[in-house]
């Protein structure tokens, strides 16, 4: 059985008080709780403060390009569906630079888990607006305040019939652990949006703000009810719901793709050289 | 064979009229009879209408290019007659159907074959008029219809016996009409009795090369002229266990290919120049993470969207220099479908051996040209594995993805095959793959990743191919898809002068002079001519940058069309 320290990597270089520390702690505890060993996990990240996350854990790691976590993670899952593949990205990475990949990963329903560290601001590049920064927020590059409507990732995911759509908050460790566990257990694509304060650059969405503006979904919510889920996702105003907003039982891509569905992972399938060479004869 | 033949058939018409199908059937028939075939296509970026043509040259000796003169012009519309009539050789003939093109042409050059009526009379629909056209060509050439009937049987087997029989009847009628109504037609094709030959286009050559190299993952976004490889890989997916994923964009495609390779299988992506422009950051990622990947780039005229369905060789310097930062890469530019086959295998081998990106640089002319070959030799293929298997990995005490070694090449493992962790990073990283910022590690990593590997990779690159006179007075220099037309030019000129072709298919790293001093050969020649399908002689500039040698003359073409043999001969001596 793996312990949380088995999932402990390098010393984080985040700012003191960053919400990432809480996410990291919960992630290690959650992984230890799953019974999985570090070598059964692949963490894929891009660039940003969240992009450094995998280095602070112990697992297989592919830390790639900004916005491109999802294509890499998708391919890893297709090549070895025995692996647990988690893509870790920030709001800029996943909702901005890599938005197109997110849309199509939800359509593919590839069995990867996307954990978005959503602090509603750009941290690494020092304080510009992200796709989830609220309207009117003034930054160095948005001197007139943000003129764009914030992206609503939950509504986007429900609209695209994503397999698993949930939201949590870094300061609510117990809830975050439950959400991570549920996402990891889901058979298919999972999007977990994790609110986190950026203590340096986001003076609006502070830890206190999140506490005040979020609530746990009531027991009675049925995540399979897409219309109800959509209403919840749209109720992104004064009070924001945390929990599993939507879930379906669509078959994931790795169980539909005939080359790998119900078979051993592609990486373990033998290559038949003679059969491949025999294809040449068709061209006589 | 007692006498030689060298005929050209050009089939012209609108997109959607099936001229490619007619051409492909004829090409296959000639190849099966042991004739040498070369075909190329000229088509517009539209699905219906416009003007397209398919050109087929067949001969009793090897041919590798298209000629301007046409012996049989099969006109599926009136425009084809008007546009191509001037290219008709003496004793050449135009086959057309006045009812279908709604126009009549007089004169001994024209044979009006009621293709549509034959189809209607025998089947009740006009669907099979193209089969009648194939029959008419066979009739004019005086060929036995047996092989055609067998091919129709194979092609329409799934549609049932009736469809096969109808097609055969229509073909026979077309052939009989042509024979009876064209007594002056002087074409004669000998019964060769030769061995059937393989007929391969450039796309299929590269695709087969990937297949036999054990490529298990192919991700791409469709883009002419690279889509042929995507289609081929998809067609092989089920039977050979290849995951083929149509990505949402080219950025996703290359990142998927890199992810698949990281996860442990040989992978490939393909695109055209514009799509490759989107892949460039991913290329750099492959360089930094030392992830093997094969990238197929089919060139077409640019900038921007350019001429989507036509040909150019203008992405050479782009592909060689693309991406931020410094890292090794390999670029191959096959000149024939056969070279595409072997070089794709070599690309996979070198990509894995040195953990670098390797390119196959093709173009529309090559991918859509069909060549006959005697066979392909599996014995020439590399089957080496450069990755650690699960058993080998389990035997290791520790594993570091980017371990420093004498060669700069670290052991390559995949995640999940053992208890060892596989860590890599687009940031500069240490031997474990974790991100660092210190200068010392940076220097060690650049030395490992780039400086140590470069000389080793350069040693793997083969010198250019010399064809013709061994001490030539005139040297025609080129790279990639101009191989065929340059070779045919040497054959044409060789009887009257001292001439050779120097063809580069392994273009980067630039070949060394160690085993074959081709620069010395060029310097001793009276005249050197660099032939390129681009406006600025990119390869000549590369050669000058790498060796200091400057070609005497340059022949360029950048109108989106390939060099025809006659045009190249005029350009060399014009």
Image: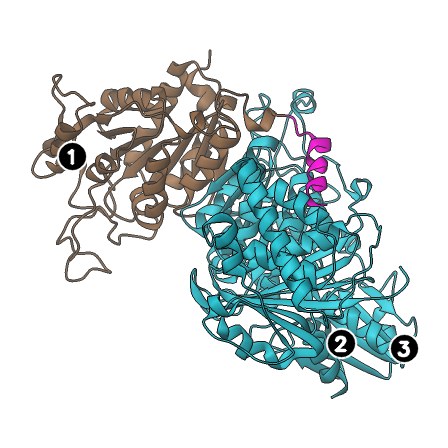
Chain colours: A brown, B cyan
- Within 10 Å of disc 2 (Cα), the crowding (few <14, some 14-19, many 20+) is few
**Secondary element type, mark 3:** loop
**Secondary element type, mark 2:** loop
Image quarter in which the N terminus of chain B is found: bottom right
Determine which residue is flagged by label 1: A233
Image point 87% across, 70% down: which residue? B468
Horizontally, residue A28 falls left or right of residue B139, namely left
- Which stretch is magenta? A270-284
Image quarter in which the C terminus of chain B is found: bottom right
Front in this rendered view, residue B265 or B410: B265
Outermost residue to the top: A1
Q: Where residue B419 sits in the image (x, y, percent)?
A: 58, 21
Determine which residue is flagged by label 3: B495
What chain does mark 2 sit on? B
Determine which residue is flagged by label 2: B548
- Within 10 Å of disc 1 (Cα), the crowding (few <14, some 14-19, many 20+) is many
């Amino acid at each position: 059985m793996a312990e949380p320290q088995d999932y402990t990597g390098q010393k984080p270089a985040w700012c003191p008080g960053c919400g990432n520390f809480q996410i990291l702690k919960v992630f290690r505890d959650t992984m230890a709780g799953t019974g999985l060993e570090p070598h059964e996990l692949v963490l894929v990240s891009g660039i940003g403060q969240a992009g450094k996350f995998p280095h602070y854990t112990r697992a297989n790691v592919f830390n790639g390009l900004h916005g491109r976590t999802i294509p890499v993670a998708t391919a890893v899952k297709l090549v070895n569906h025995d692996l647990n593949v988690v893509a870790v990205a920030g709001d800029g990475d996943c909702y901005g630079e890599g938005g197109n990949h997110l849309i199509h990963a939800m359509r593919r329903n590839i069995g990867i888990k996307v954990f978005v560290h959503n602090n509603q601001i750009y941290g690494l590049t020092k304080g510009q607006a992200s796709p989830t920064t609220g309207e009117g927020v003034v930054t160095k590059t948005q001197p007139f305040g943000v003129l764009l409507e914030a992206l609503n990732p939950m509504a986007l995911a429900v609209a695209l019939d994503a397999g698993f759509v949930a939201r949590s908050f870094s300061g609510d460790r117990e809830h975050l652990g439950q959400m991570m566990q549920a996402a990891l257990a889901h058979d298919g694509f999972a999007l977990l949006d994790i609110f986190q304060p950026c203590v340096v650059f986001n003076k609006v969405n502070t830890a206190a703000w999140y506490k005040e503006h979020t609530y746990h979904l009531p027991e009675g919510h049925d995540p399979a009810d897409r219309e109800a889920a959509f209403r919840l996702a749209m109720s992104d105003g004064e009070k924001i719901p945390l929990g599993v907003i939507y879930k379906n039982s669509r078959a994931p891509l790795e169980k539909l793709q005939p080359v790998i569905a119900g078979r051993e992972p592609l990486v373990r399938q033998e290559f038949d050289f003679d059969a491949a060479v025999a294809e040449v004869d068709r061209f006589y | 064979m007692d006498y030689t033949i060298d005929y050209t058939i050009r089939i012209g018409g609108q997109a959607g009229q099936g001229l490619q199908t007619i051409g492909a059937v004829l090409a296959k028939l000639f190849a099966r009879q042991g004739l040498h075939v070369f075909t190329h296509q000229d088509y517009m970026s539209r699905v219906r209408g416009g003007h397209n043509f398919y050109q087929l040259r067949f001969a009793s000796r090897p041919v590798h290019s298209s000629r301007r003169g046409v012996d049989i012009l099969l006109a599926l519309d009136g425009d084809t007659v008007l546009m191509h009539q001037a290219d008709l050789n003496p004793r050449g003939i135009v086959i057309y159907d006045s009812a279908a093109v709604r126009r009549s042409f007089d004169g001994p050059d024209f044979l009006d074959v009621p293709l549509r009526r034959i189809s209607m009379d025998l089947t009740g629909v006009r669907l099979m008029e193209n089969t009648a056209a194939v029959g008419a060509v066979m009739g004019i050439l005086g060929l036995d219809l047996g092989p055609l009937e067998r091919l129709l049987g194979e092609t329409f087997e799934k549609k049932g016996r009736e469809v096969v029989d109808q097609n055969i009847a229509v073909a026979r009628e077309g052939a009989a009409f042509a024979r009876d109504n064209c007594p002056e037609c002087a074409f004669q094709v000998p019964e060769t009795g030769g061995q059937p030959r393989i007929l391969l286009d450039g796309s299929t050559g590269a695709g087969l090369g990937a297949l036999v190299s054990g490529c298990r993952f192919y991700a791409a976004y469709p883009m002419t002229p690279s889509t042929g490889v995507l289609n081929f890989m998809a067609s092989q997916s089920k039977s050979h266990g290849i995951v083929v994923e149509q990505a949402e964009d080219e950025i996703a495609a290359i990142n998927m290919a890199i992810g698949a390779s990281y996860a442990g299988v040989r992978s490939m992506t393909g695109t055209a120049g514009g799509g490759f422009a989107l892949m460039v950051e991913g290329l750099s990622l492959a360089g930094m993470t030392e992830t093997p990947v094969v990238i197929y780039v089919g060139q077409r005229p640019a900038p921007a969207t350019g001429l989507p369905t036509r040909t150019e060789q203008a992405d050479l310097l782009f592909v060689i220099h693309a991406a931020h930062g410094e890292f090794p890469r390999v670029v191959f530019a096959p000149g024939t479908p056969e070279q595409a086959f072997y070089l794709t295998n070599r690309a996979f081998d070198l990509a894995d051996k040195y953990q670098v990106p390797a390119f196959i640089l093709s173009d529309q002319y090559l991918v859509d040209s069909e060549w006959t070959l005697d066979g392909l030799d599996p014995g020439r293929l590399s089957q080496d594995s450069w990755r650690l298997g699960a058993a080998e990995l389990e035997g290791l005490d520790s594993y570091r993805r980017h371990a420093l070694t004498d060669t700069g090449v670290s052991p390559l493992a995949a995640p999940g095959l053992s208890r060892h962790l596989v860590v890599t990073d687009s940031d500069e990283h240490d031997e474990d793959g974790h991100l660092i910022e210190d200068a010392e590690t940076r220097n060690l990593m650049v030395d490992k990743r780039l400086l140590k590997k470069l000389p080793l990779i350069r040693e793997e690159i083969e010198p250019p191919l010399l064809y013709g006179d061994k001490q030539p007075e005139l040297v025609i220099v080129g790279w990639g898809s101009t191989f065929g037309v340059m070779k045919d030019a040497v054959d044409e000129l060789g009887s009257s002068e001292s001439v050779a072709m120097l063809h580069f298919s392994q273009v980067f790293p630039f070949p060394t002079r160690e085993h074959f001093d081709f620069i010395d050969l060029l310097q001793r020649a009276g005249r050197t001519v660099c032939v390129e399908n681009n406006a600025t002689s990119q390869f000549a500039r590369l050669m000058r940058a790498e060796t200091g040698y400057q070609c005497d003359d340059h022949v360029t073409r950048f109108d989106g069309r390939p060099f025809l043999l006659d045009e190249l001969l005029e350009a060399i001596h014009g």
